[in-house]
Image: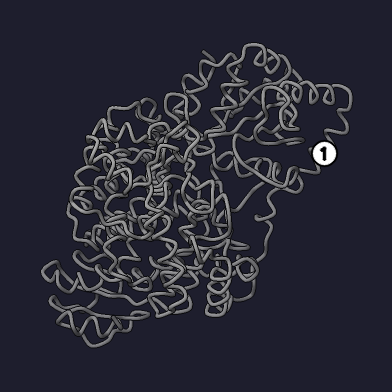
C-alpha cells in the first residue's frame, strides 16, 4: 500500500494499492519534490468519474507505467470533491492550455506547486492522435532535465495568469436587477431546445439553476418561460438520465434527447433537480412533477443516507467493470422477472427492444421518450416497476462514495427542508432535522470552524471552504423556516459570521475560496461562476440577503450587495453562467417580504407560505429569535412586512394570501 491508505477520501483509498507511489496533497510531497529535484505529477479525479477509472486501470495499475512515474516524478493524487480549491486552480491551467477541462486532470508542477503543463485523460498507448501517458511522462522529464529554464518561465507565466477572479474590482452600484433578469431570461429562451428541452446540444446537462430562472418567470405569468420549463422537465424525466425504477438523476446525457446518461448519480444533482421539480409542482400543480420530486427524495433517503443522518456524495457509473450495467435491461430479463406477457407490456412501456439502445448488446435504458411527459404509471406498470426494482437490488451495485461533504449536504438540507414544508411530509422533515444535527455534530469543530468532508473510518479533516459556509447558511435558514425552531437561525447566523470573518474580501467584496486560516495556494481565487453547483459567492449573496431580512443584521445585507456589485459586469455579459446569482438579483429587483407568525398554534397560516412558491418571501414562525420582526407581535396573527414595516395583521389564510399576492 502507498500513502493513500490512511486518507478519508474513498477515491484516494481506491488508489491505495496502486504500484504508483502516491502522496496526498501536502507538505510531505512538496518537500520530497524539492529534495529529489523532481516535478510533481498531480492527478485529480473523483470516485464516480468513469474516465478516472479507465485511466487508473490502464496506467496507474500497470507496474511498468507506475515505475516510470515513480522514477521521474513525485506523484500526488487529489479528490476534487474534497479539495475543490486545488482542482479549480489547476483546472484554469488545463483550460488555458487545451481549451477544455474535465477529469481525470493531469497537471505537472514545479516543486513550488507552479504549473507548467497539463491535460485531462491520456491513454496508456498512442490512440486517436493522443500521446500515450508513458510517452508524455518521458517527454516532460526530458524537457525538465534539458530545458529547465523554459519550463520555469512557463510556470511563472501560467501562475501569474491564475486567480483573475480574486483581482476583480466591484462596480459602484448593484446592477439594474430587472434589466439583467430580463436579459438572462431572453438569453435562456434563445438557447432552449424547443423539441427536447434543456439548453444547447450534446452532451446535455440539466442546468438546474437556469431552470429555476424559468420557474420564477413562469410563476409571474411568462408563458414562454412556462413552456420551456415544462418541455425541459418532462423530457428530462422521460429520458434515461432519470432512473425510472429507483428515482434520482444521472449527471448528464451524452446525447441531446436525454436518453443515454453518464450514469453516475451525484448528491448535488438530486438536491438541485428535486428543488426545481418541487417549485414547478408548486407553480403548475403537475402530478408528474410531484412524482419525480417524491421519487428523487426517496432515492436519496434510501440509498445515499448515512444512518446518523448525513448524505453520501455519489454512486459510480460503473458496476462489474462496465458503465451502466446496473441499470440496463433486455426483454428476456424483464420476462424472467415478470413473465412473458407482462414483461412484453413493460418492455413496450419503457422502450426496451431486442436491438437495445445502449452499448451492451441487446441492452436498453428504460425511458419514456416515446411518450414524453406521460410519466404517471397505471397500476399494472407500477406493480411491475416495484418488482423490477427488487430484482435489480440483487445485482452488483455501483460503487458508493460514502464521504459526507458539507457543501452538498447543505444543498440537500435546503431542498429537503423546503420540500418537507411544502408537501407536509413529516418523514422528510425528520430527515432534514437529522441531517442538520449530523452536520453540527460531525463537521463542526468545538471552536466553531467547519470542516469540508467526513467519512466514517477517518472522521473529518479538511477545512471547509466558502461554498461550504454558503450552503450551510441557506440550509439552516430553510430548516428554520420549515420547523419554526430558533436554533437553526442561530446556526445560520454562526455560518454567516464565519463566512464573513474567514473568507470575505473587505476591500473588493465577495468571498475568497479559502479561509484566512487555511493553506494558501500559489494564487488566491474567488468562486464566482455557477457550474454544476452554485458558486460560493452566489450561495453567499442569496443566503445573506435572506438572513438579513429575517434578522435585520445590516452587515449581512451589505455583504450580499457587495457580492452583487463584484459580479455585476460578469452577470450582465454572461447571465446564463450565473443562474443561482440571478436568484439574488431577483431578491434585489422585487424586494423581500418578511412574514412573521408568532407561535406554533396556527398551522393554516404557516401553510400559506410553506405550500406556495414564494421565492421573495422569508418566514419567521414558532420560536422567536433576536430580530425586530418579533417586537410587539401577537399570537394568532400573521404579519407581512418589508424592511420591517408591516401591513395590518392577517388572521386568516385568505387575507394572508391576498397580502402576499397569491
576 in relation to 133, above or below: below
Q: Is residue 288 left or right of residue 233?
A: left
Disc 1 element: helix
Residue 21 location (% of width, % of height): 61, 16
Q: Is residue 242 left or right of residue 151?
A: left
Q: Choose between 58 and 383: the one closer to the eye.
A: 383
Residue 513 location (% of width, % of height): 56, 49
Q: Residue at x 24, y 76 (%)?
A: 631
- Which residue is label 1 attached to? 154
The total number of labels drawn is 1
226 in relation to 290, above or below: below
Q: Choose between 80 and 443: the one closer to the eye.
A: 80
Q: Residue at x 68, y 41 (%)?
A: 522
207 in relation to 87, above or below: below
Q: Choose between 264 and 509: the one closer to the eye.
A: 264
Res 264 quadrant in image: top left
Amino acid at each position: 500500500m502507498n500513502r493513500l491508505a490512511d486518507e478519508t477520501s474513498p477515491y484516494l483509498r481506491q488508489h491505495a494499492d496502486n504500484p504508483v507511489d502516491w502522496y496526498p496533497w501536502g507538505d510531505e510531497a512538496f518537500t520530497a519534490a524539492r529534495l529529489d529535484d523532481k516535478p510533481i505529477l498531480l492527478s485529480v479525479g473523483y470516485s464516480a468519474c468513469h474516465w478516472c477509472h479507465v485511466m487508473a486501470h490502464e496506467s496507474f495499475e500497470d507496474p511498468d507505467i507506475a515505475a516510470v512515474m515513480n522514477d521521474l516524478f513525485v506523484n500526488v493524487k487529489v479528490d476534487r470533491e474534497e479539495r475543490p480549491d486545488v482542482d479549480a486552480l489547476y483546472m484554469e491551467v488545463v483550460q488555458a492550455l487545451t481549451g477544455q477541462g474535465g477529469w481525470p486532470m493531469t497537471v505537472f508542477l514545479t516543486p513550488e506547486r507552479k504549473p507548467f503543463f497539463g491535460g485531462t485523460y491520456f491513454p496508456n498507448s498512442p490512440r486517436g492522435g493522443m500521446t500515450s501517458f508513458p510517452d508524455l511522462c518521458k517527454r516532460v522529464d526530458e524537457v525538465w532535465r534539458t530545458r529547465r529554464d523554459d519550463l520555469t518561465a512557463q510556470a511563472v507565466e501560467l501562475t501569474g495568469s491564475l486567480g483573475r477572479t480574486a483581482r476583480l474590482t466591484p462596480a459602484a452600484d448593484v446592477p439594474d436587477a430587472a434589466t439583467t433578469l430580463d436579459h438572462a431570461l431572453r438569453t435562456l429562451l434563445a438557447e432552449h431546445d424547443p423539441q427536447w428541452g434543456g439548453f444547447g446540444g450534446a452532451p446535455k446537462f440539466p442546468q438546474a439553476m437556469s431552470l429555476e430562472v424559468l420557474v420564477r418567470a413562469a410563476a409571474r405569468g411568462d408563458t414562454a418561460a412556462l413552456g420551456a420549463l415544462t418541455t425541459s422537465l418532462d423530457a428530462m424525466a422521460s429520458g434515461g438520465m432519470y432512473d425510472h425504477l429507483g428515482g434520482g438523476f444521472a449527471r448528464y446525457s451524452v446525447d441531446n434527447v436525454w436518453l443515454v446518461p453518464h450514469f453516475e448519480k451525484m448528491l448535488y444533482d438530486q438536491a438541485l433537480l428535486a428543488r426545481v421539480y418541487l417549485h414547478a409542482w408548486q407553480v403548475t400543480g403537475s402530478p408528474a412533477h410531484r412524482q419525480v420530486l417524491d421519487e428523487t427524495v426517496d432515492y436519496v433517503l434510501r440509498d445515499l443516507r448515512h444512518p446518523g443522518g448525513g448524505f453520501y456524495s455519489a454512486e459510480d457509473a460503473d458496476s462489474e467493470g462496465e458503465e451502466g450495467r446496473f441499470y440496463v435491461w433486455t426483454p428476456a430479463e424483464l420476462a424472467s422477472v415478470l413473465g412473458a406477457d407482462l414483461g412484453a407490456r413493460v418492455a413496450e412501456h419503457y422502450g426496451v427492444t431486442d436491438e437495445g439502445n445502449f452499448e451492451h448488446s441487446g441492452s436498453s435504458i428504460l425511458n419514456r421518450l416515446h411518450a414524453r411527459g406521460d410519466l404517471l404509471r397505471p397500476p399494472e406498470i407500477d406493480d411491475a416497476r416495484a418488482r423490477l426494482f427488487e430484482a435489480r437490488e440483487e445485482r452488483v451495485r455501483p460503487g458508493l462514495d460514502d464521504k459526507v461533504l458539507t457543501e452538498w449536504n447543505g444543498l440537500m438540507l435546503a431542498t429537503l427542508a423546503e420540500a418537507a414544508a411544502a408537501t407536509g411530509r413529516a418523514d422528510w422533515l425528520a430527515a432534514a432535522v437529522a441531517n442538520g444535527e449530523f452536520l453540527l455534530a460531525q463537521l463542526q469543530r468545538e471552536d466553531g470552524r467547519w470542516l469540508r468532508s467526513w467519512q466514517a473510518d477517518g472522521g473529518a479533516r479538511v477545512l471547509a471552504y466558502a461554498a461550504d459556509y454558503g450552503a450551510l447558511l441557506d440550509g439552516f435558514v430553510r430548516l428554520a423556516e420549515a420547523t419554526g425552531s430558533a436554533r437553526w437561525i442561530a446556526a445560520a447566523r454562526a455560518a454567516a459570521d464565519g463566512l464573513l470573518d474567514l473568507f470575505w474580501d473587505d476591500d473588493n467584496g465577495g468571498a475568497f475560496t479559502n479561509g484566512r486560516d487555511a493553506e494558501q495556494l500559489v494564487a488566491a481565487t474567488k468562486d464566482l461562476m455557477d457550474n454544476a453547483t452554485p458558486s460560493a459567492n452566489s450561495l453567499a449573496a442569496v443566503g445573506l440577503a435572506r438572513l438579513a431580512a429575517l434578522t435585520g443584521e445590516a452587515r449581512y445585507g451589505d455583504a450580499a450587495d457587495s457580492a452583487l456589485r463584484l459580479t455585476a459586469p460578469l452577470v450582465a455579459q454572461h447571465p446564463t453562467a450565473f443562474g443561482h446569482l440571478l436568484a439574488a438579483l431577483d431578491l434585489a429587483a422585487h424586494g423581500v417580504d418578511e412574514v412573521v407568525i408568532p407561535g406554533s398554534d396556527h398551522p393554516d397560516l404557516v401553510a400559506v407560505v410553506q405550500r406556495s412558491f414564494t421565492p421573495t418571501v422569508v418566514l419567521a414562525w414558532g420560536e422567536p429569535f433576536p430580530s425586530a420582526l418579533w417586537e410587539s407581535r401577537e399570537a394568532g396573527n400573521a404579519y407581512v412586512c418589508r424592511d420591517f414595516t408591516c401591513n395590518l395583521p392577517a388572521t386568516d389564510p385568505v387575507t394572508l394570501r391576498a397580502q402576499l399576492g397569491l
